[in-house]
Image: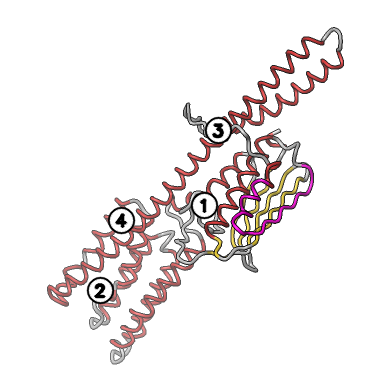
């Protein structure tokens, strides 16, 4: 599981619409502004030193490009038009600046458009950027034409590569969600089947003693009512998840994981040399089976995250707090993120699976680095929604 504090659901939904997170959008703007000012701005200052009034006008056009790039992630077509026109204006004022350099901001915006918008739109933008090619040929001959076309095509290709990379990431995240839902559906199936079997036995017992021991029959009926409520809560999860294929029950799944077995799970981590502290606040033995199972799986995946990705971690603290209307789960380690991680949300399936489990019981989950070091996974799972 990739250790990241960003939320994959929101990020992938926004990127599917061609949107970027605010932080990525600001980083893109600062990067584009630095590149345009550093390369084109310097070229304009050097080339326009002896051109009088043309220099400040050309610098003003460069600043317009920098300002327009602020919206290139949201309005790439409009920003591309602005940057292309102002770039041509810079080149017309200072022919010493190559056409390729004058249109640098437009090439950056073309890359962004190619990465975030449908391919048909980006192909039209690529064709539009090729229209000034005769000017490049007139100014620099075959060499100038080749350089201009090469930079434009490379900008478009880089955007297409980034787009393909994001699509693969989204596909992996969707596949992880589907597999996790199928796994949850199998587990819920077992829980509901067990509950219904108990209800059948209780109904038979109530029928046997209904006349002679009516109070015992009432207890059996109350147990049936409690079991039915629990089964209805489980069925809500089953209806939300994908129906599992027949014959895919995993060995050991019928011994249902539970917070009651949390110490057993912690022992498996302690066997690796890591110190594990388990704290319980409140009673968890009366939790709905779905919530109990989700909490256990979240802790389990958080342990896996620590073992795989927390470099130098030697201590993990688990706290489970039952507050009546909800149960809170927190897993904190003292490790650090391994170097060389991709940093892409959804590159691993663990975080996606934990969020899906929390969501299916009506809860929420956040995960990310702690300010003082280490990594934390915190979930809040409501009890009333599935009871």
Residue 270 covered by magenta stretch: yes
Snapshot colouring: secondary structure
CA neighbours of label 1 inside 10 A, class few (<14), some (14 to 19), many (20+)? some
Residue 133 horizontal side relative to residue 207, left or right: left
Give the mark, 2 or 1, whose residue is nearer the N terminus: 1
- Residue range in magenta is 264-283
CA neighbours of label 4 inside 10 A, class few (<14), some (14 to 19), many (20+)? many
Mark 4 or 3, closer to the camera: 3
Residue linked to disc 4: 122
Disc 3 versus disc 2: distance between alpha carbons? 57 Å
> Which residue is at a point 79% across and 45% down the rendered structure image?
282
Residue linked to disc 2: 100
Residue linked to disc 3: 185
Residue linked to disc 1: 8
> Which residue is at a point 73% across and 37% down the rendered structure image?
287
Taking the view exactly as shown, the residue that stands out farthest to the top is 211
Mark 3 or 1, closer to the camera: 3
Give the mark, 3 or 1, whose residue is nearer the N terminus: 1
Displayed quadrant of residue 214: top right
Q: Percent x, y for residue 207?
A: 77, 10
Quadrant location of the C terminus in the rendered image: top right
Q: Percent x, y for residue 335?
A: 59, 64
Disc 3 versus disc 1: distance between alpha carbons? 22 Å
Residue 92, placed above or below residue 22: below
Disc 4 versus disc 3: distance between alpha carbons? 42 Å
Q: Percent x, y for residue 226?
A: 75, 26
Displayed quadrant of residue 211: top right
């Amino acid at each position: 599981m990739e250790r990241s504090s960003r939320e994959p659901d929101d990020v992938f939904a926004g990127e599917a619409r061609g949107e970027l997170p605010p932080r990525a959008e600001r980083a893109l703007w600062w990067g584009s502004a630095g590149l345009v000012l550093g390369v084109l701005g310097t070229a304009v200052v050097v080339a326009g030193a002896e051109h009088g009034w043309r220099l400040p006008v050309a610098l003003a056009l460069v600043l317009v490009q920098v300002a327009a790039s602020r919206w290139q992630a949201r309005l790439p077509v409009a920003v591309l038009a602005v940057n292309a026109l102002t770039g041509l204006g810079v080149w017309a004022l200072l022919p010493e600046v190559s056409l390729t350099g004058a249109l640098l901001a437009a090439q950056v915006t073309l890359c962004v458009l190619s990465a975030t918008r449908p391919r048909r739109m980006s192909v039209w933008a690529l064709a539009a950027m090729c229209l000034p090619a005769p000017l490049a040929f007139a100014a620099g001959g075959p060499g100038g034409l080749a350089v201009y076309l090469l930079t434009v095509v490379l900008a478009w290709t880089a955007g297409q590569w980034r787009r393909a990379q994001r699509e693969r990431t989204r596909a992996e995240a969707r596949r992880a969600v589907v597999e996790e839902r199928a796994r949850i559906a199998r587990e819920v199936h077992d829980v509901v089947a067990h509950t219904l079997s108990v209800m059948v036995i209780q109904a038979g017992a109530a029928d046997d003693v209904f006349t002679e021991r009516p109070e015992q029959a009432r207890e059996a009926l109350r147990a049936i009512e409690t079991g039915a409520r629990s089964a209805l809560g489980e069925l809500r999860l089953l209806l939300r998840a994908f129906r599992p294929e027949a014959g895919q029950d995993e060995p050991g799944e019928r011994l249902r994981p539970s917070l009651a077995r949390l110490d057993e799970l912690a022992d498996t981590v302690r066997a690796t040399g890591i110190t594990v502290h388990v704290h319980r606040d409140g009673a968890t033995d009366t939790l709905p089976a779905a919530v109990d199972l989700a909490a256990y799986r979240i802790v389990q995946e958080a342990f896996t995250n620590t073992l795989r990705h927390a470099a130098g971690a030697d201590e993990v603290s688990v706290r489970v707090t039952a507050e009546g209307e909800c149960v809170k789960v927190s897993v904190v380690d003292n490790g650090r993120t391994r170097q060389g991680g991709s940093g892409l949300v959804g590159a691993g399936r663990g975080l996606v699976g934990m969020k899906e489990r929390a969501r299916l019981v009506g809860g929420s989950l956040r995960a990310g680095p702690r300010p003082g070091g280490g990594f934390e996974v915190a979930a809040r799972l409501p009890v009333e929604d599935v009871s």
